[in-house]
Amino acid sequence: MATDNLSEPVPSEPVDPHADLSSVLPMTAETRDGHLWVGGVDMVELAREAGTALYVMDEEQIRHQLREFRKWTTFHWKDVETVYAAKAFMCKAICRVVHEEGCMVLCASGGELAIALAAGVPASRVQVHGNNKTPAEIREAVLARVDRIVADSLLELERISAVAVELGVEQPVLLRVTPGIRPDTHGYIQTGQEDSKFGFGLNHGLALAGVKRACELPGIDFAGLHMHIGSQIFALQSYSKAIEVMVEFMAEVQRETSCPVRDLDVGGGIGIKYGLADEPSTIEQFGKVVVDGIKEECERHGLTVPRILIEPGRAVVANAGITLYTVGVVKDIPGIRTYVAVDGGMTDNIRPALYGARYECLVANKADQPRTEVVTIAGKHCETGDLIARDTPVQPPETGDIIAVCATGAYCHSMASNYNKQVRPAVVFVRDGEARVVVRRETYDDLMRCDTE
Ligand SMILES: Cc1ncc(COP(=O)(O)O)c(C=O)c1O
């Protein structure tokens, strides 16, 4: 590959034009008459009918993932709750699916809480976290009577207490602790190290002081401890190490205070397969490492095993999603590269620009052909870094083709923006041959909805 004006080198893996993409596509994906189908729906037809850019989610796979998390955690210990981290992909439809599958919803803001409640999820099945919740967000959560608020600081404890006292309620609270572990993932998505904006560190007695304060404040029911060490984690040892630290801290809490730790929340972060070379662990392996790890550590310290909470986000929705685009300009720069421009980009998928994330792509209307061309899929926005996939194999692309980008179900729709005043795409759930629009495409009117003059 020629040198270029794109600063980061791309790893030069050998490209197999016949590589099987099924491990990064939704579980119901198949090829019929040369087209990509998902959930029994022809993606090329859907793109023509619903327009592009378009997010498509395989509902069957979302349900399957949620069931797998429940199955492989409660297999090892009866008292485990799967709390879907809605930041990965949030709308009313996903909240209903999560609730129907017996899981809880984790909200990262007042906006997410409003959506979960509007979707009909009972507040008793909702939890709220965030490193700097506003006083208004705290009030909304306490007023709704959510199952747990994860408190990140002494200031938040004071604020939760004040609202709970005013409303005459006891608010169950978890204390977020940073166990001092750096998992094997991008620096931007490591969150459990001591040098972090999140939670209470263990050094200098900060976390213990937080627990003591939570226990003495009126209106607060100290329910237990929370950690979240990062995202897109492949090495399960990172969880094992963090669990060792957290259970040791539970023992310290037991020794030093009279506050029982009823809940231990290990957060989310389970990695998923974006590229064919990625080898994330399975949900079964995750369940075993986390639940057995907590049980063993509790036994070693003579502690009662708490209720265990897990908070998967990406692993529930990422591989269930694809994004469809229509190819516009194909620009070949001899000796350098071919740019294939699509009708979306960093506004519907910021991850390549933000983290250098890589995706597998295919031409949905040529799905039965080998991916013999190496091209760069570019967005339509006014930034050189607006690329969806650099130097990636696809079937020979032409103007009008439909490109499918795999594994875009997480942190794409939820991070979408209106940069360049691009309207955000619709989201379509597909299942058993049916396609339903669960989030409609924005209109130009939506872009001006908040203008006051
Ligand atoms: C507290 C918390 N829990 C869970 C998650 C979900 O992480 P993931 O989508 O990587 O599973 C996040 C995401 O950053 C988070 O901040």
Image (cartoon, rainbow, N blue to C red):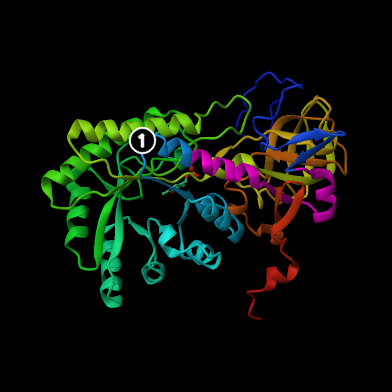
From the viewer's perspective, tell me whether residue 441 is left or right of residue 366: left
Placement of 13 over or under 283, stated as above or below? above
Viewer-side residue, 416 vs 278? 278
Among the 4 quarters of the image, the one containing residue 264: top left
Residue 77 at x, y = what percent?
Answer: 36, 38
Instruction: Name which residue lies at 22% across and 59% down.
Output: 214
Q: Is residue 158 magenta?
A: no
Residue 185 at x, y = what percent?
Answer: 46, 34
Q: Is residue 62 magenta?
A: yes
**Magenta residues (range):** 40-69
Residue 352 at x, y = what percent?
Answer: 61, 41
Viewer-side residue, 432 vs 206? 432
Instruction: Name which residue lies at 69% across and 69% down.
Output: 446
Q: Which residue is mark 1?
A: 291
Counting other residues with Cα less than 10 Å from the Cα at mark 1, is it few (<14), some (14-19), or many (20 or more)? many
From the viewer's perspective, tell me whether residue 173 is left or right of residue 372: left
Quadrant where the C terminus sits is bottom right
Amino acid residing under circle 1: Val
From the viewer's perspective, tell me whether residue 299 is left or right of residue 354: left
Viewer-side residue, 133 vs 434? 434
Instruction: Name which residue lies at 37% across and 67% down.
Output: 145
Observer able to see residue 420: yes
Residue 194 at x, y = what percent?
Answer: 30, 41
Quadrant where the N terminus sits is top right
Q: Secondary structure at mark 1?
A: helix
Instruction: Name which residue lies at 50% across and 66% down.
Output: 117
